[in-house]
Image (cartoon, rainbow, N blue to C red):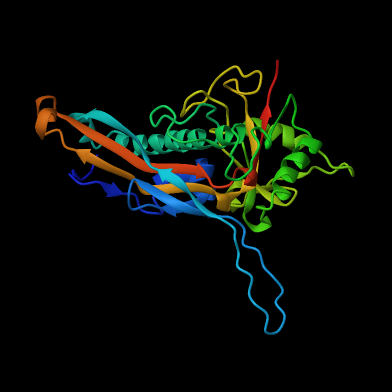
Amino acid sequence: MARANVDTWLVEDRGSDLIQRIGFASVVETNFRSVPMTTYIKSEPRIADMDVDVIPKGGTYGEDTSGVDEVLLTTFKYGKALRLAEEDSEDTTVVNVLDAKKLSWGRSFATKYDNASIGVVAAQNGITVPHTSIYRTLSQADSTTGYAAGANLLSGAALTYDELSALVGLVEVSGYHDDSTSLFFAHPAFKAAIRGIKDTQGHPIFIPNPVASGIAGTLFGYPVKFTNGAKTTATASSNPTGAGGAAGVAGNPLFGFGNTELLLAGKRSGPESVVIPGRDGLSALTDEDILKVRARRAFTVAMPAAVALFELTHA
């Protein structure tokens, strides 16, 4: 396999196969508001609504008294290393193993980042739970914004027209809804269900579009994106599993709706990779090349009321 050995991290080009793979598989990476980060920690302002007065000619401007606070984004590193015998990596007759592994890493990263940001039910610990997920945020009270614990968490044994309407309604009345930046995000397990949901006229409410068009399907006019990460788990996983059951049990598929401008995806660096040749350091003793791939990401919900989740449960 023809390749160049390097000793510096190579940032993936925007149009690379790896970036496209992640973009296709991850809702958080592609659709939530991207926040560039130049340090591992960054505070983003969360500004309470500013009021407006009608002022008569010569009148005095009233001063706004709404508060100003902030949310904190902390990056954590998603990465993996692969050892490959130098003889295999230099064999021009074999498949490009390094590129194939990078694509596989991209798919796993997309799912794990989404799961950590959407479906993990436990509190953040910076290791197995890198972020405070949407699910966790909505399950806890927030005295700063006045959000009540569980207010935007719906659950049931089946996803129905009424449940979908209620899900959207929770966000629409929050004061933080914006038609232009809102979307549905869901686990693929819901695809069959929403294809069968009809309105009062008997028409399907889910309007799919071909994948090749690059346009998402729609529900109630809002885009619908699917991710394998939208499932309840105890810790962040690149392959969320579990038998499911009552609310909060691992394995329950999630269907979400929210204003993506208030769902913050912090991006410090990557995806990027480096190939360490098997002629250097300890690798020289085994003739093994090492591929390392990483990305540093953060996530937080700026306003809990701006997003809602439906959890598919069963006894």
Query: Which quadrant would the C terminus be assigned to in this image?
Result: top right
Query: Which quadrant would the N terminus be assigned to in this image?
Result: top left
Question: Residue 16 in the image: x percent, y percent?
Answer: 39, 50
Residue in the foreground of this view, choosing between 233 and 22: 233
Q: Is residue 247 above or below residue 95?
A: above
26 on left or right of 56: left
101 on left or right of 155: left
Question: Residue 173 in the image: x percent, y percent?
Answer: 73, 49
Residue 20 shows in this picture: no
Q: Residue at x 65, y 63 (%)?
A: 51
How many numbered badges does the structure rendering display? 0
Q: Residue at x 84, y 44 (%)?
A: 203
- Looking at this view, name the residue that lies furthest to the bottom: 58
Q: Is residue 121 above or below residue 19?
A: above
Residue in the foreground of this view, choosing between 206 and 164: 164
Residue in the foreground of this view, choosing between 311 and 29: 311
169 on left or right of 72: right
Residue 170 shows in this picture: yes
* Residue 58 falls in image quadrant: bottom right
Q: Residue at x 46, y 29 (%)?
A: 238
Question: Residue 257 in the image: x percent, y percent?
Answer: 65, 43
Q: Is residue 115 above or below residue 234?
A: below
Q: Residue at x 69, y 48 (%)?
A: 174
* Residue 288 falls in image quadrant: top left
